[in-house]
Structures are given as structure tokens and as C-alpha cells.
């Protein structure tokens, strides 16, 4: 299950993940913790979420200006909407692929230091957030306080945005900038590994 994998060199990661297609849907698998703490920990333990959520912060730092606070707010808000869609039974095709693609695209944006107007960056980040939320709207741990789980999940997500933002702002020049771009590349490769597993 992708969520249980530790981060290995991305090229090694990509191959075994291709074999996990059947298990890629298991976002809230057996034995996963429920409630607030379960929600808080899931984005941090699930690499497909973690890399994308870090990348949101990293890209916000790259863009600067209003994107600094807009992107880390747009993502959790739209993610909650996506979860509501899932709970309401509204279908969203390609959820796993969408989550994986979010890592690829956001990682590449950071790796190449690409810029976009706020309307474009906000729309893109929001579209990806929909997939992250929907995956959990349809797999809410039933009977274990979905609201507490959701609150923990949103908080965990925002902490990852802040971590990315902090890293991105601290690494704006010199060697830090190279490290930032490299991190974006690793995120894109990790996302590509999950994409192989999802399609
Ligand atoms: Zn998940």
C-alpha cells in the first residue's frame, strides 16, 4: 500500500508502485487510526498526499505575494468540498490518478520555478485538492467520528503547507534555491511513481 512505503530513491520507488494498482484505493485501510489523530497523521504518513501538500507550500513560496497565503488556504477549503462531494456520493473519476498527478505537476512547477497568475495557480491547486478530499469522502472511517477525522486531516494538511512554505521561504537564494528545485524534482518523481500505480 503506497501509504506505508517510506521514501526511497524515486527511481526505485516508481517500479514497485506499478504493482500496487489494486491497493492504491486503500486510503483508509484496515488498522488505520480513526478520529482526530488519525486524520492528522494520514496526510503525513501517506506519501501521495504528503508530497503534493508540501509542494503547495513550496510553490506558494516560489510565487510569493498573495499566493503565499492564498494557495495554503485554497487547498484545504476545496479539499473539504471534495470530501463533501464524496460523502454525498457524487462521483469523481480518476481520483487516485488525480492525486498522483498533483504531485507530478506541482513538483515540476517547483522544480522549474514556474510562475502563474493567482487565478491560474489557485484554480490548479484547487482542482488537485478536490481529488485529495474526494478520496476520503468516499472512504470515511464509518462510525469513528468523521468530523474529528476531517478536522485532523485539514490541520495536518495545513501543517504540511506551512512546512513547505517555510522551507521555500528559507531557500530563496544560492544553494538553498538549488535544494528547493531538487526537492520539486523528487516530488514530481514520487508522484510519477504513484501515477504508475494508479493507472
Ligand atoms: Zn489518503
Image (cartoon, helix red, strand yellow):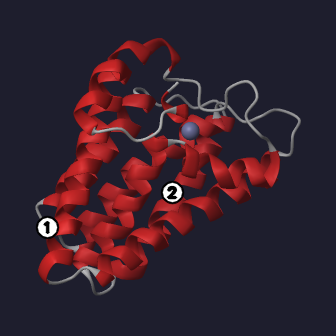
Task: Indicate the position of residue 108 as horizontal and vertical percent values.
Answer: 18, 53
Q: Is residue 128 left or right of residue 5?
A: left
Residue under label 1, please give it: 113
| Image-quarter location of ligand 1 | top right
Question: Compared to 151, does 149 lie above or below?
Answer: above
For the residue labelled by badge 1, is the local secondary structure a helix, a strand or a loop? loop
Q: How crowded is mark 2: few (under 14 residues within 10 Å), some or many (20 or more)?
A: many
Q: Is residue 81 visible?
A: yes
Q: Which of 10 and 163 is in front in this view?
A: 10
Above or below: residue 136 compared with residue 119: above
Task: Out of 186 and 191, give the one closest to the viewer.
Answer: 186
Q: What residue sits 15% from the left and 84% below the top?
A: 173
**Image disc number at residue 80:** none
44 and 86: which is toward the camera: 44
Dot 2: element: helix
Residue toward you, 191 or 84: 191
Determine contact: label 2, label 1, CB under 8 Å. Answer: no
Residue at position x 23%, y 77% from top? Answer: 63
Disc 1 crowd, CA 10 A, few/some/many (<14, 14-19, 20+): some
Task: Kindly indicate the quadrant of the structure image that contains residue 125.
Answer: bottom left
Point out the tag, 2 or 1, that comes first from the N-terminus: 2
Task: Give the CA distance from mark 2 to mark 1.
Answer: 24 Å
Where does the image place residue 194, in percent across and percent down from the top left?
Answer: 35, 31
- Please give the residue where the numbered disc 2 appears in the rendered image: 78
Amino acid at each position: 500500500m503506497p501509504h506505508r512505503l517510506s521514501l526511497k530513491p524515486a527511481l526505485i520507488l516508481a517500479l514497485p508502485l506499478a504493482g500496487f494498482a489494486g491497493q492504491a484505493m486503500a486510503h483508509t485501510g484496515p488498522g488505520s487510526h480513526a478520529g482526530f489523530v488519525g486524520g492528522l497523521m494520514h496526510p503525513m504518513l501517506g506519501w501521495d498526499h504528503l508530497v503534493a501538500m508540501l509542494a503547495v507550500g513550496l510553490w506558494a513560496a516560489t510565487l510569493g505575494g498573495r499566493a503565499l497565503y492564498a494557495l495554503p488556504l485554497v487547498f484545504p477549503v476545496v479539499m473539504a468540498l471534495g470530501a463533501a462531494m464524496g460523502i454525498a456520493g457524487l462521483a469523481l473519476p480518476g481520483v487516485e490518478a488525480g492525486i498522483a498527478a498533483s504531485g507530478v505537476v506541482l513538483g515540476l512547477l517547483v522544480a522549474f520555478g514556474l510562475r502563474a497568475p493567482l487565478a491560474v495557480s489557485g484554480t490548479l491547486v484547487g482542482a488537485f485538492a478536490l481529488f485529495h478530499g474526494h478520496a476520503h469522502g468516499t472512504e470515511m472511517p464509518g462510525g469513528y467520528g468523521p468530523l474529528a477525522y476531517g478536522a485532523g486531516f485539514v490541520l495536518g494538511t495545513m501543517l504540511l503547507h506551512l512546512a513547505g512554505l517555510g522551507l521555500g521561504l528559507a531557500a530563496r537564494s544560492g544553494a538553498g534555491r538549488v535544494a528547493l528545485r531538487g526537492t520539486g524534482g523528487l516530488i514530481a518523481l514520487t508522484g510519477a511513481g504513484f501515477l504508475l500505480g494508479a493507472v
